[in-house]
Image (tube, grey):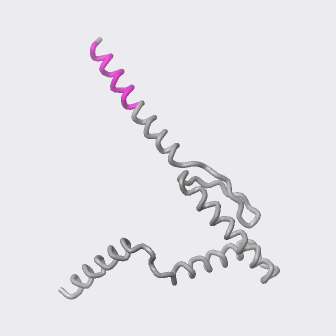
Amino acid sequence: MQFNRSLNLNVFIKYYIRQTKHQRLSDEYISITVWLASRSYRIRIRREEEEAVRKSIKQADEKIAELRQHYAGKDDQDFIAMCLLMYAADHATEPLEHPALQAELNTILQKIDKMLNA
């Protein structure tokens, strides 16, 4: 009988850990529906990122509306692709704003240089 209690307790502990972990993940992530180029997309994001995601979607949708006015006759997918390319180009030319990241990148580059020169 002692074995069964121990087994049941073990099963309960595993179940509790699994449920607790699932609950933590559920608390960290939320599902939201966003609209981009007249289509809805259901996405799962971290709770603390919701405002930034919604702001980004709004900016992208405004950019797509602007592109529609300038380039009539194009498909929505074309506008989404143009918007994505503009966004990527803007971010590729921006200098790094995070000093810690810049320092880490410099360290990595120095290590690569040492390995190449060795």
Q: Quadrant of the C terminus?
A: bottom left
Q: Nearer the viewer, residue 6 or 94?
A: 94
Q: Is residue 37 above or below residue 68?
A: above
Q: Is residue 42 above or below residue 80?
A: above
Residue 9 falls within the magenta-colored stretch = yes
- Residue displayed at 64% across by 64% down: 55
Q: Is residue 70 above or below residue 45?
A: below
- Residue displayed at 68% across by 73% down: 80
Whole-percent x, y for residue 4 in the image: 32, 16
Which portion, as a residue range, is magenta? 2-15
- Which of the 4 image quadrants contains residue 106? bottom left
Residue 20 falls within the magenta-colored stretch = no
Query: For this view, does 118 lie left or right of residue 71?
Result: left
- Residue displayed at 27% across by 14% down: 2
Whole-percent x, y for residue 57 in the image: 66, 65
- Which of the 4 image quadrants contains residue 6? top left
